[in-house]
């Protein structure tokens, strides 16, 4: 079955009846670039070299270039030609501005070289075979040679170029190493000029690492050319996790991405007030207790009610210029006391009228301490003479229980009475139970019997309760004195 051309397709094939050109027509009208920006080497050095060929390569094309190290395979990044047709093409001014912002003089940018041609299949096969040989066989040979000479450095990679005239040995060492014996030995082995390049932990990750925990290629391997030190201050400013396992990269150092937004965080942090500073809000003055850098919010604790509120930094006011909160009205104003007590459960008009529990407890404790520190009435067994105690002025000590009575018994009834003991003039006298002029009764029983009798007898109970001195004799009266006698 033959295919008949349709009129509509024949019309579209005619450029005169189309609004847009095909990709082939667009590529045919392009001019070859005059300079090409490429990256080369294991460290991914950047260079811009002139190009005078007729081919029109695109981004990612492999080129053979003559660099400052020799003839090697490079990868095309973009062109500085404005009509190259590539969406990633930039001007030379934009490229130099990018280099200046990405490290300036430290940025590995080279211009001493030339683009020779677009890499062919033979060039790529030769480069692949040479790279595999140096990554396996030659790397082990260099490590063995360095170990035999007593070097403690770590050989990371041996990098050749396509022409074979230059070999770079990347090594990791904490100290400076003298290579006067190793370099000539390696030059004789490779038949090329040998360069010893000391690197750090971040450069080692650039050569050996592949992907980071974010799922992307390591920044140092992909686009980052200048590896600046990263401090813990950046992690604290960004309020990131301070766990070393979470903020460390493949190199074991702090991740380079902490430095990307550090300048932005510093600029935003300068706009926020410091913690514990005084600020004013639309609801009254307060104290700053926390802040959020990215969202520019400040957490303020108000003075009048202690409530925490989040305020944008643009709405903060000076402390003396912010509106003052109004006084809280009395909710029980105009009500009777009975209604207030009924609503508050008998607590009073306001909660401030009630003494706190801790204040009441402290009052009770002080009263108990004063009672304990006051002098007490001496016991009957240890008191040498009858006297009135300040704590109980109307209760004299028992004369029959004194040590003098126990050792020197008094005469029988009818003898000369003993002189009265002096009393405390400051103590009040009680009219009952005082028998200062009566003779003391002889003790016929021991102290234990007297205590038991005094506790059980009616006279002892009354004497103790009324302040009189209980008698131990058999003829004791109800007031504690001898029966049939009165005070003289």
Image (cartoon, rainbow, N blue to C red):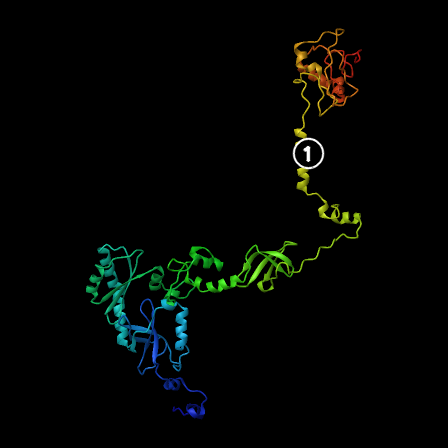
Residue 181 % position (x, y): 21, 59
User: How far across and down, in percent of the image, does residue 250 sit?
Assistant: 38, 60
> Can residue 118 be seen by looking at this rendering?
no
Q: Is residue 131 left or right of residue 97?
A: left
Q: For this rendering, which residue is in front, 412 or 95?
A: 95
**Residue at the far front in the pictured view:** 320
Q: What residue is drawn where x is 71% and y is 19%? A: 387
Q: Is residue 459 above or below residue 283?
A: above
Q: Is residue 396 above or below residue 6?
A: above
Instruction: Indicate the quadrant containing the C terminus: top left, top right, bottom left or bottom right.
Output: top right
Q: Residue furthest left?
A: 188
Which is nearer the eye, 158 or 19? 158
Q: Label 1's element?
A: helix
Is 25 placed above or below 361 here? below
Nearer to me, 422 or 188? 422
**For residue 445, side relative to residue 119 (left or right):** right
Q: Determine the residue positioned at 42% across, 56% down.
A: 245
Q: Position of residue 222 (x, y in %)?
A: 38, 68
Residue 209 as seen in the image, left or right of residue 478: left
Q: Is residue 39 left or right of residue 418?
A: left
Give percent across and percent down for residue 323: 66, 60
Residue highlighted by disc 1 = 367
| Image quadrant containing the N terminus | bottom left
Mark 1 surroundings within 10 Å by alpha-carbon count, few (fewer than 14), some (14 through 19), many (20 or more): few
């Amino acid at each position: 079955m033959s295919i008949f051309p349709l009129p509509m397709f024949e019309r579209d094939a005619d450029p005169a009846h189309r609004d847009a050109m095909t990709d082939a027509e667009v590529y045919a009208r392009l001019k070859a670039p005059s300079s090409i920006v490429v990256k080369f080497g294991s460290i991914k050095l950047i260079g811009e070299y002139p190009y005078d060929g007729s081919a029109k390569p695109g981004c990612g094309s492999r080129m053979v270039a003559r660099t400052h190290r020799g003839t090697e395979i490079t990868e095309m990044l973009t062109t500085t030609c404005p009509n190259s047709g590539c969406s990633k093409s930039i001007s030379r001014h934009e490229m130099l501005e990018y280099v200046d912002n990405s490290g300036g003089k430290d940025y590995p940018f080279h211009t001493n070289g030339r683009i020779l041609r677009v890499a062919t299949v033979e060039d790529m096969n030769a480069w692949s075979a040479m790279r595999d040989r140096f990554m396996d066989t030659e790397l082990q040979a260099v490590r063995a040679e360095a170990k035999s000479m007593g070097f403690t450095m770590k050989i990371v990679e041996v990098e050749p170029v396509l022409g074979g005239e230059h070999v770079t040995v990347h090594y990791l060492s904490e100290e400076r190493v003298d290579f006067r014996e190793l370099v000539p030995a390696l030059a004789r082995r490779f038949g090329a000029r040998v360069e010893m390049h000391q690197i750090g932990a971040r450069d080692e990750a650039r050569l050996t690492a592949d992907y980071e925990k974010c799922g992307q290629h390591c920044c140092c391997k992909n686009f980052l050319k200048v590896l600046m030190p990263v401090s813990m201050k950046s992690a604290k400013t960004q309020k990131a996790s301070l766990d070393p396992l979470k903020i460390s990269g493949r190199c074991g150092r702090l991740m380079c991405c902490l430095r990307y937004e550090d300048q932005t965080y510093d600029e935003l942090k300068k706009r926020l007030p410091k913690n514990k500073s005084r600020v004013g809000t639309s609801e009254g003055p307060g104290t700053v207790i926390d802040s959020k850098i990215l969202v520019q919010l400040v957490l303020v604790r108000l003075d009048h009610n202690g409530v925490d509120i989040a305020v944008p930094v643009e709405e903060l006011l000076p402390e003396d210029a912010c509106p003052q909160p109004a006084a809280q009205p009395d909710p029980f104003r105009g009500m009777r006391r009975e209604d207030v007590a009924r609503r508050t459960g008998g607590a009073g008009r306001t909660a401030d009228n009630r003494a706190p529990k801790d204040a009441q407890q402290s009052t009770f404790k002080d009263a108990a301490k004063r009672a304990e520190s006051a002098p007490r009435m001496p016991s009957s067994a240890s008191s040498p003479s009858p006297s009135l105690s300040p704590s109980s002025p109307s209760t004299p000590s028992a004369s029959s229980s004194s040590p003098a009575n126990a050792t020197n018994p008094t005469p029988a009834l009818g003898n000369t009475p003993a002189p009265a003991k002096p009393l405390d003039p400051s103590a009040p006298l009680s009219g009952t139970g005082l028998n200062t002029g009566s003779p003391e009764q002889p003790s016929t029983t021991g102290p234990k019997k007297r205590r038991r009798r005094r506790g059980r007898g009616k006279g002892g109970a009354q004497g103790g309760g009324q302040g009189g001195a209980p008698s131990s004799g058999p003829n004791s009266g109800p007031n504690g004195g001898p029966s049939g006698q009165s005070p003289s």
